[in-house]
Each structure stands twice: as structure tokens, then as C-alpha cells.
Image (cartoon, rainbow, N blue to C red):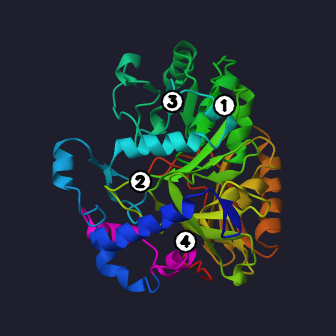
Amino acid sequence: MNPVNNFMYPDGYEYSCNYLLDHALCHVPFYREHWRKYDLDPQGSADARYARMPILTKADMRSCFPYGLVSEELDAEQGLKDNRIEYTFTSGTSGEKVINLWNQEWWHASEMASWKLNPVLSRLSYPPRQATLASSLNVGISCEENLPMDHRIMGNLLYLNEKANIICWNDYHLERMARELNEYRPAVLEANPSLLARACRYWISKDIHVFSPDVITFTYELPSQVSLKFIRQVFDCPLVSSYGTTETGFVMETDEHGRYVQNTEECRIDYLPLNEKYGIPDIGRIVVSTFHNPWSVIVRFDVGDLVRIHHGESHRGFIADRIEGRTSNSTFAADGTLVTTAMTDDAMAEIDNLTDYDVTQADQDTYRVNITVLKQEEAALKKTEMIMKHLYGEHGIYEIKAVKDLLPGPAGKYRRTHAEFDFELEGEN
């Protein structure tokens, strides 16, 4: 074991870090052309070398697409012809979308390695019998027609939803999902937690029994406390969160304590603390480097999220107590203190009968809040106002409304908090 970044890392980890950087700077066109000049001490420690490197952004990836991040010994055009790789699109907003060269073999290896980090997943065979519930914008099959079950099964995977927009969900679809889970009996249910919670609310209201798999894994979004409340009423199995991106694979997995543990076999994580002016010393950004994907060599990629670093003892690499949310979804109290999506979510979870919410910060002290509730709307509105004042400041201007429904954004995912003005969370490194 070697001490790196105040955590203990497995033997061979520093070698993997240095090998990746050496290879990128010598054999990958983008890094060789733009980053090699920053490697002032090639014999130095991995931490020192990586700290001198820039941060890889999605704009960089777009600028050098399609072959700038491909190892020079590989023929990407031939790889596309041979179906070893394919083009895939991330589902972010227009400023976040990237076309990637997708290698399925690398993706599976990354997922398999991440399963070792959670005791429930580590006991299952891979690949598992799995059902997936997410927007078809993110994964699976997209179709305006209602596809029969056998048209939505691919190998070991059953896709429960073929609709790009959940506004198309009706009683038929929600009852079909329950029926298919009961029939298919997956070992793993992979789900967008917001969409699964929506289905759970319906099943609860109709007293519909739903089969519980060995484990539910959350992807595509971070689970809201409000969503978890409904999911736990329907399912009695363990809940696990996988954290990663299309570009970096499976970066972290929650362990038996709910902490996010680094997938050290597959990636490097660098933690970048925020400027002290934001008043939260334990929260920072992370950038990720991946070890085993020569078709898309990723070094210090800005994944766009904030994490709360774990300060306890770790012998498994980097550990985060939780993911705080997208950097771009940050909001701020009237005094300028950072308020992450997770902080807002903790506070909103205290509202009785709440089913969903969103908070938009228009300017320094003006906030628009929409909530959806099962009942007792007036009480929920009053509690929301009290929570907003406690979280953002007594003298803020709050426009709070109860609405009939809240739907995901254009990328098929919910954005529960965001500010309508530009800001920069600069790191100290």
C-alpha cells in the first residue's frame, strides 16, 4: 500500500497512473501536442505530475474529435468498420453534449471492477439478469409505439421503458412495468431514481405488489431523499448508487456504509478543493483519468460534479461521503455561501407529503420554488418557505408554488436546483 492524497492505495496504483500519463503524452495526439510541455519532471511522483496537467474539458474533446484521444497504434476507422467501437452521444444539455468513441468491452470491464466495491454486488454473477428503468434518451430502445416485452429484451437486459418523455406514461405503462418485473424477476434493477420513484408512487396508490430484486442500482441521476422515501416503501432490497460518466466509465460505487469508493482498478481521481470563500472546506470538484480505454484516452477529465470528501481512514483509495450534485446546478445563499443540490435535497426532505420540487435562483437573493405534494398543500407551502429562509437567508425573495407535476429536462433527467446566472467555482490547486 502506498500513501497518495491522504488515502491508502493498492500496490500498482501509482504505476498505473504514471503509465497512463506517459502513454498519453507520447502516443495520444491531443496530449502530445498540447500537454507534453507541462511534464517538467517525468521521473517525479504521479501526484506531482498530474497536478501540473490542465483539466480536460468537453470543449477539448469536441475540438479534437474524432481521433485526437485515440492511441496512435490503433486504427479508429478500422475499429468502426469492425464494430469494435461505435459513436455514442452523451445526453447532457447542448453545452455538455459530446460524441464519444464507445468501446463496450471496456465499459463492461469497468462495471465488473466496480461491483467488487459493494458486498451485495460482489456476490452476484456478471452479467446479471437485469431490468432497466430510465428514459430512452439515456439508454435502451426509443419508440413512440408500445413495444411488447420480447421486443425490449436484449441478451440479459429487459428495458422497462421505451418512451423518450415520461409524459407518455399512463396507467397501462405503469402497470405493465410492475407486471414485467414480477414475471422477469431480475437479479438487478438498474434505475433512474426519479423515474422509479414516480412508478412507485403509482404502485403504492393502487396497492400493486412488485417483485424485489437482489439489489437496485441507481444511475443516470443521484437519488433524491424524496425519491428514496417512495422506493423504500415498495422494495425491501439493498439500494446501491453507481457513479460515473459515459466518458470515464464506473468511477465510484457505494459500499455497505453508503460511501462512494473509488474504482482504483480502472481510474484515478484527483480532488480539487473549492475556494475558501464558499465556506465549505470538505466539498470540492473531482477530475478523473481512466486506465484501460485506448480508444478514448481520458486524463484529468472534469466530470462536472462536487463531492464531499471522507476524512476517515481508507485503505481502498479515494472515498467520498456523498456526491453533492452537479457543479452547474449549484445555488447560493444571499451571503454567497455555496448551497449544493444535496444540501437543498436534505432540507426539502423534511416536508410532509412532498413528491418532488425544483429550486431556481434568479439572482443573488431571488428564488422560485415549485413543489408537488400528495395532500395538505398549504402546510407544505408554509414549510417550504421556512426551509428556504433557513437555507438561503431570511431576507431572500421567495416565490413558492404548488404545481400539478414536474417533468425531467430535455436530457431525460431532473435538474432540481440551478442558478440563472453565471458563476465560477474555482479550485485552489
Q: Which residue is mark 3?
A: 126
Q: CA distance from mark 3 to mark 2?
A: 19 Å
- Amino acid carrying label 1: it is Arg
- Which x, y percent locates residue 78? 16, 49
Mark 3 and mark 2 in contact? Answer it, CB < 8 Å: no
Q: Which residue is mark 1?
A: 201
Residue 288 seen from this side: no
Instruction: Tell me which residue sits at (29%, 79%) in the image.
Output: 33
Q: CA distance from mark 2 to mark 1?
A: 41 Å
Q: Nearer the viewer, residue 337 or 402?
A: 337
Q: Earlier in the sequence, mark 3 or mark 1?
A: 3
Q: Is residue 177 covered in magenta?
A: no
Circle 4 packing at 10 Å, graded few (<14), some (14-19), many (20+), is few
Residue range highlighted in magenta: 42-67
Q: Which residue is mark 2?
A: 292
Instruction: Tell me which residue sits at (20%, 47%) in the image.
Output: 80
Q: Is residue 38 left or right of residue 422?
A: left
Q: CA distance from mark 3 to mark 1?
A: 31 Å
